[in-house]
Amino acid sequence: MVTIHIDNLSVHLARRAVIERVDAVFEPGRLIGVIGPNGAGKSTLIRAMLGLIPYDGHVAIDDAEARGLSRPALARKIAYLPQGQTLHWPLTVERLVGLGRLPHLAPMSRISQADQDAIIDAMTKADVLALRHRIATELSGGERARVLLARALAVQASALIADEPLAALDPRHQIEVMELLREEARGGGLVIAVLHDLTMAARYCDRLLLLDTGRVAAEGAPLDVLSPERLAATYGIAARIDQTEAQPLIVPLHRSG
């Protein structure tokens, strides 16, 4: 299982501070939501954690500094689903999902039966098995999003980081994806998801990390983080937080102030 420790993490892009002195611990067995308004630094934080951009401070993945790990070694530990991916090659869905097995393959090696089983399992979980022979570039935006999630699942890494996994999905598939991410965490994996839907974050995540202008504004249990005062301070909104049902409902009402 993978644990990620962040200590005093800062990121500067174009000489501007995007992330400033962030400390956090991401432990296995949990679905952790990273939330915050546009421009808060959510995606930048994720990319720094994966060593995709330069950073100051420390990111330890199972006690090893992230920037010291080879790309294949890191890819076997953490599967990454970035936001807004563009498909350029007319691959079938099955072949595209199969790219998730690359971190496990030696050069010039062939897909094994175990690899094929992982591919089928990932497509089944992401509800795209029926699309396996379709050309990925011809799919709708929501279908492509689920296929790319399947590619990340096919890695079978101990951790999964998904940046806006609900984008372009209809309500049913949003629920299914959140249930899937929670199930992956319940199975012992570490799952981190960047989310904009506050109700989904409150209902499915075990913990939330709220960013505002590159800093941690709050961290903890969802309903502790999503207080009316914090929503007003970070998002600039007044919201109704309804806990009368088994699952909370967070409804933005209007701009605050």
Image (tube, grey):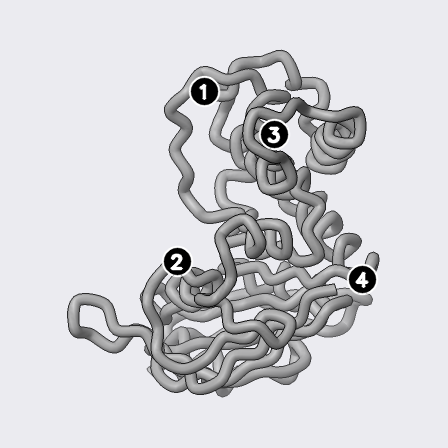
What residue would you read off at disc 4?
A: 188
Indicate the quadrant where residue 29 lies.
Answer: bottom right
In contact (CB < 8 Å): disc 2 and disc 4? no
Q: Which of the two marks, 1 or 3, is nearer to us in this view?
A: 3
Q: In what element is the residue under mark 3?
A: helix
Q: Is residue 224 above or below residue 251?
A: below
In space, the residues marked 3 and 4 are separated at their CA atoms by 23 Å
First in sequence, mark 3 or 4: give its number.
3
First in sequence, mark 2 or 3: give its number.
2
**Amino acid, disc 2:** Leu
Q: Residues within 10 Å of mark 2 (few under 14, many from 20)?
A: few
What residue would you read off at disc 2?
A: 52
What residue would you read off at disc 1?
A: 137
**Amino acid, disc 3:** Val
Q: Residues within 10 Å of mark 1 (few under 14, many from 20)?
A: some
Q: In what element is the residue under mark 1?
A: helix
**Amino acid, disc 4:** Gly
What residue would you read off at disc 3?
A: 97
Q: In what element is the residue under mark 2?
A: loop
Q: In what element is the residue under mark 4?
A: loop
Percent position (x, y) of residue 91?
50, 17
First in sequence, mark 2 or 4: give its number.
2
